[in-house]
């Protein structure tokens, strides 16, 4: 392989890698936008139904400590490690912890909501965000299942 051929191959490879990375970034952005719509729908519906909010608590990475936050909202999962606040932001409620966090509380930063919660986790348990939010709405209002309620946004 001569030098010009090697350079051409290398340039083509770099272009392919960039195109793949760009496509992946566009896919992630589209998923995050769709998940943000679901979260906004959930907050509007939970507010309309009068679903009770709670003061959210974060847990330490090691799972032992519990730390106060200034956030109010709804826990999305049973483990209470993911939540949606009343402003429509999604939060992962795991923090480094420590003495300062114990004394002053913590302010977890919002993060993009995933369309599938738990995807890629070690335990293999994953569930669509829409399913979690719908379940939370139904449990919070005592509804047994599908009823006449505004549909969740699609795409």
Image (cartoon, helix red, strand yellow):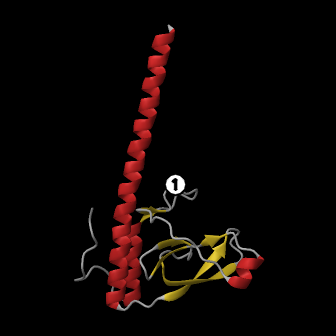
Q: Nearer the viewer, residue 94 or 133?
A: 94
Tell me where residue 31 appears, x and y as whole percent. 37, 58
Q: Mark 1 points at which residue?
A: 120
Residue at far top of view:
2
Q: Which residue is depicted at the point 50% across and 66% down?
A: 111
Q: Which of 47 and 130 is in front in this view?
A: 47
- Quarter of the figure with residue 34: bottom left
Tell me where residue 131 appears, x and y as whole percent. 38, 70
Q: Is residue 38 left or right of residue 117?
A: left
- Quarter of the figure with residue 152: bottom left
Residue at far left of view:
148
Q: Which residue is depicted at the point 36% across and 87% down?
A: 47
Q: Nearer the viewer, residue 94 or 22?
A: 22
Q: Which residue is depicted at the point 48% across and 22% down?
A: 10
How many numbered callouts?
A: 1
Q: Nearer the viewer, residue 142 or 130?
A: 130
- Quarter of the image that includes the C terminus: bottom left
Q: Which residue is depicted at the point 41% across and 87% down?
A: 140
Q: Label 1: state its secondary structure.
A: loop
Tell me where residue 44 appears, x and y as whole percent. 33, 82
**Pointer 1: residues within 10 angstroms few (<14), some, or many (20+)?**
few
Residue at far right of view:
99
- The answer to whether 3 is drawn above or below residue 139 in the figure is above
Tell me where residue 19 appears, x and y as whole percent. 40, 37
């Amino acid at each position: 392989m001569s030098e010009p051929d090697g350079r051409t191959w290398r340039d083509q490879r770099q272009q392919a890698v960039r195109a793949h990375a760009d496509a992946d970034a566009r896919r992630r952005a589209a998923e995050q936008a769709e998940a943000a719509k679901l979260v906004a729908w959930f907050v509007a519906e939970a507010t309309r139904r009068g679903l009770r909010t709670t003061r959210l608590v974060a847990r330490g990475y090691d799972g032992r400590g519990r730390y106060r936050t200034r956030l109010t909202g709804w826990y999305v999962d049973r483990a209470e490690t993911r939540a949606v606040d009343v402003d429509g932001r999604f939060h992962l409620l795991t923090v480094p912890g420590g003495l300062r966090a114990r004394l002053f509380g913590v302010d977890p930063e919002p993060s993009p909501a995933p369309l599938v919660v738990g995807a890629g986790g070690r335990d293999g348990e994953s569930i669509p965000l829409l399913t979690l939010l719908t379940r939370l709405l139904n449990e919070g209002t005592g509804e047994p299942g599908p009823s006449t309620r505004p549909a969740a946004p699609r795409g």
